[in-house]
Image (cartoon, rainbow, N blue to C red):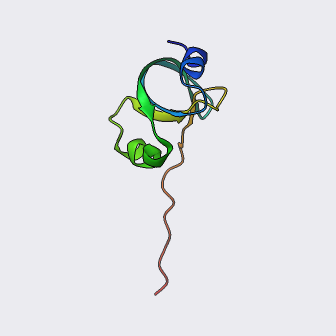
Amino acid sequence: MKWQQVRELFPDQFVLLSILDYREEDDKKIITEVAPVRAVSEKNANQEFFSAEPGNLVYHTANEECVIHLRRDPLMRVRRRS
């Protein structure tokens, strides 16, 4: 299912999605095909987001596109002062 279809079925709410297909552009993963699993209450969205299985995502349908911003930077190392 396309993201626009999910937005129409679940207007203005969080949805747990299974990611079926995506493309990468620069530092973004643009989700092109999803399978909605279920609506998620606003109260539980944060918890559901962090407990989502790999390949799943909690996202709000107010967003016009379903995009994940990728972080490709290596972890910053900070030297301790002695």
Number of disc labels: 0
Quadrant hosting residue 36: top left
Residue at 50% from the left image edge and 44% from the top image edge: 42
Residue lying furthest bottom in this view?
82
Front-lying residue, 37 or 79: 37
In the rendered view, tell whether residue 52 sits above or below residue 19.
below
Residue displayed at 64% across by 31% down:
63
Q: Residue furthest top?
A: 1
Q: Quadrant of residue 61?
A: top right
**In the foreground, 36 or 12:** 12
Q: Residue at x 49, y 12 (%)?
A: 1
| Rendered location of residue 54, percent (x, y) | 34, 33
Q: Using residue 52 as the reference point, say whether residue 66 is left or right of it.
A: right
The reply, left or right, for residue 19 in relation to residue 6 is left
Residue 7 left/right relative to 42: right
Q: Position of residue 24 (x, y in %)?
A: 56, 25
Residue that appears at 46% across and 35% down? 58
Q: Quadrant of residue 11?
A: top right
